[in-house]
Structures are given as C-alpha cells and as structure tokens.
Amino acid sequence: MANDTPPRWDRRMQQRLARGEAAALGELYDRFASLVHSLAHRVLDDDQAADQVTREVFLAIWENPEAYDPRQGNLRSWVARLTQRQAVNRLRQTEATAYAETGVGSAEELEAKVRRASAAARADYIVTSMPAPLRKALELAYFQRRDYRQTAADLSISHEEARRRLRLGLQLLSTANTRPLDGPPGGYGRAL
C-alpha cells in the first residue's frame, strides 16, 4: 500500500526522477494519481479541474524532483501537500474570476470556502493515510453506527482496544481543521 512505502523507496524514486527516468514518473503516477485526483476533486468539486490539477502536480514533480526532502516526511505526504496547495490556488483563482465577472461574493466568503474545502481534503487524506486498524474502527463507528462494544465484537478485539482505536482515529481527524492553509496535510513529517 502507498502509505506503507518505505523511506528507501522514496529516496530511490526521487533519484530516478532527478535522472529524468520517464518510467519513474509513470510508476509514481500509478501509485499516487488516484490520491492526487481525489484530493483535488475534494477541494474543487469539479472533475475537469481535478484532472488539470493532477497533471500540474505531476508536471511539477517531474520538473523539480529535488524539491522533495525525504527527511521531512514520506513522498506520499509531500505529493498530497503539493496537491493541496495547487488545488487551493486553483479554487482561489476560479472564485476570484467568478467574483470579478459577477460581483457576487466577497473575499471573506472565498476564504471561508477555501478553509472548508481544505479541511475536507485534509480529513480525506488523514483517513486514507491512517493505519488500517484505526480506519476500520472509525468506518464501523461512523458509517455503520456501531458503538465501541459493537466495534470490538466486529473486529474481534477487546473493548479497551476498540476505544483506543476510535480515540486515536478521532484525534488524527481533529487535526484536519487545525492546520494552516499553506501547511502540510495531517501527518506530514511523521508517521501516522
């Protein structure tokens, strides 16, 4: 799975991209394109715009592979951060153009929309990046409306372990609204 990618793979991928290996870009695209597109779509709510952001993100990676610093976190988080930044910039640009053309809206409304979209994209990223046991416990509790006892039974774990997983998962999700707009998505630079 992409979120279990070892740092060694990240460094090798960066080196291959720096050497201009087209196959490396293809491999990176295969691994992260769905993440990039889904994060961009979450911010922009537009398939065509998400497609364009996806192309722009991979072009930026191809042109500047040295911008990635493996000491700051894994490649997946860096790609997500690039996507977040590009999608937010696109949203601001699109909304500013719409405002200029129609005169409807305000800078405050635009920033509120950007904050909501950014928080939603960060939450999606956090959920997809968290360890599978935490994600499964949250899915049972949230989507299937299970309490911690039912979650424990469904997962064949103790009640205490179910509470721990739910608590940790919710703590990770709570960071989605606390990150600055230009900062990294939850978990960048540290293991989830």
Image (cartoon, rainbow, N blue to C red):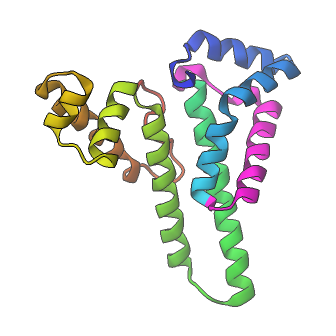
Q: Is residue 114 left or right of residue 21?
A: left
Q: Quadrant of the C terminus?
A: top left
Quadrant where the N terminus is found in the figure: top right
* Front-lying residue, 3 or 176: 3
Q: Is residue 4 shown to the viewer in this render?
A: yes
Residue 48 in the magenta stretch? The answer is yes
Q: Provide residue 134's location: percent of width, then percent of height.
A: 32, 30
Number of marks in the rendered image: 0
Tell me which segment is drawn in magenta: 44-73
Q: Residue at x 19, y 29 (%)?
A: 152
Secondary structure mostly taken by the magenta-highlighted segment of the chain: helix
Percent position (x, y) of residue 162? 19, 30
Residue placed most toward the observer, 2 or 113:
2
Q: Is residue 144 above or below residue 160?
A: below
Question: Relative to 20, is 144 on the left or the right?
Answer: left
Queried whether the magenta region covers residue 53, the answer comes back as yes
Q: Quadrant of residue 54?
A: top right
Residue drawn at x 84%, y 19% is 23
Counting from the top left corner in percent of width and height, residue 140 is at 30, 39
| Left or right: 171 as drawn, with respect to 73 | left
Seen at 75% across and 14% down, the residue is: 15
Residue 20 showing in the rendered view:
no
* Snapshot quadrant of residue 167: top left
Name the residue located 73 percent from the left edge and 28 percent from the top edge: 30
Indicate the quadrant where residue 132 lies: top left
Give the x, y percent position of residue 70.
59, 20
Instruction: From the viewer's side, name the closer residue of 184 and 21.
Output: 21
From the viewer's side, name the closer residue of 27 and 151. Answer: 151
